[in-house]
Image (tube, rainbow, N blue to C red):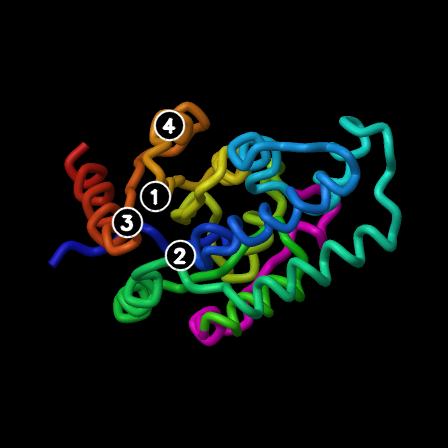
Amino acid sequence: MASLCFDAVLFDCDGVLVDSEPLRLHVLRDMLAELGWHLSPERCKALFLGRATADDLRLIEARTGKKPSQDWIDAFQLRRNQALRQHLVAVPSITSALQWLRAQGIPIACASAGEKDKIELQLRQCMLIDYFDGHLHSGVDLPRNKPHPDVYLAAAQGLGVDPKRCAIIEDSAIGIRAAVASGATVFAYCPHYEAETAIANGAQAVFHHMQQLPDTLLQYCRLQSTA
């Protein structure tokens, strides 16, 4: 059986491990409408997918001329977390993909632009947290968040591996740019077939169902061994 050519696999969280983005964006869109900024679901996704909350706030202020108050931020996080607790599910087939990596003896980590408590809430909700052995990293805790590579560099360092020997699984343009900047090999999970955007931002390969992750990684490594 072919083996992996990576020392570790690093995962984004939202949209890769858990199907949280539709819930977050729905809450955000409703609250932006309350501020007078009305967005279609498609436009909201285009503007805010993969972004950290702090970046969201800067964009909201730039587009509305109103700086979101701390009360607004607290209300957003409360409503978002309520939606996550009530409706969040894991990305289909992610559990089997993580089990496969564990069987290969490949260490993994989660590196998200979101807050650490949100990462933990989501992974516990979906019963995924035990796979990561505490290797959970938040870009909020670092000087620079995505699209800078800092959170992925921290995740690789936490596992004691060279970032260039890592595979990174991402789903957003911002996240892909962060992953590419870390020097890792980036694989884009694109369940909605946005392959062109992923490749344009530097992903080495695209897959559309999480059950395809093992074969996607193995195929890449086979090609590298014959190059």
Relative to 210, does residue 133 appear above or below in the rendering? below
For disc 4, the marked residue is 199
Residue type, mark 4 in image? Ile
Magenta region includes residue 148: no
Q: Earlier in the sequence, mark 1 or mark 2?
A: 2
Q: Position of residue 100 (x, y in %)?
A: 27, 66
**Disc 1 element:** loop
For disc 2, the marked residue is 8
Magenta region includes residue 143: yes
**Quadrant assignment for the C terminus:** top left
Q: Residues within 10 Å of mark 1 (few under 14, many from 20)?
A: some
Q: Which mark is nearer the camera, 3 or 4?
A: 3
For disc 1, the marked residue is 191
Q: Which mark is nearer the camera, 4 or 2?
A: 4
In the figure, is residue 218 to the left or right of 108? left
Answer yes or no: do the residues labelled 4 and 2 have beta carbons within 8 Å? no
Q: Residues within 10 Å of mark 3 (few under 14, many from 20)?
A: some
Q: Earlier in the sequence, mark 2 or mark 3?
A: 2
In the figure, is residue 9 to the left or right of 179? left
**Disc 2 element:** strand
Answer yes or no: do the residues labelled 3 and 4 have beta carbons within 8 Å? no
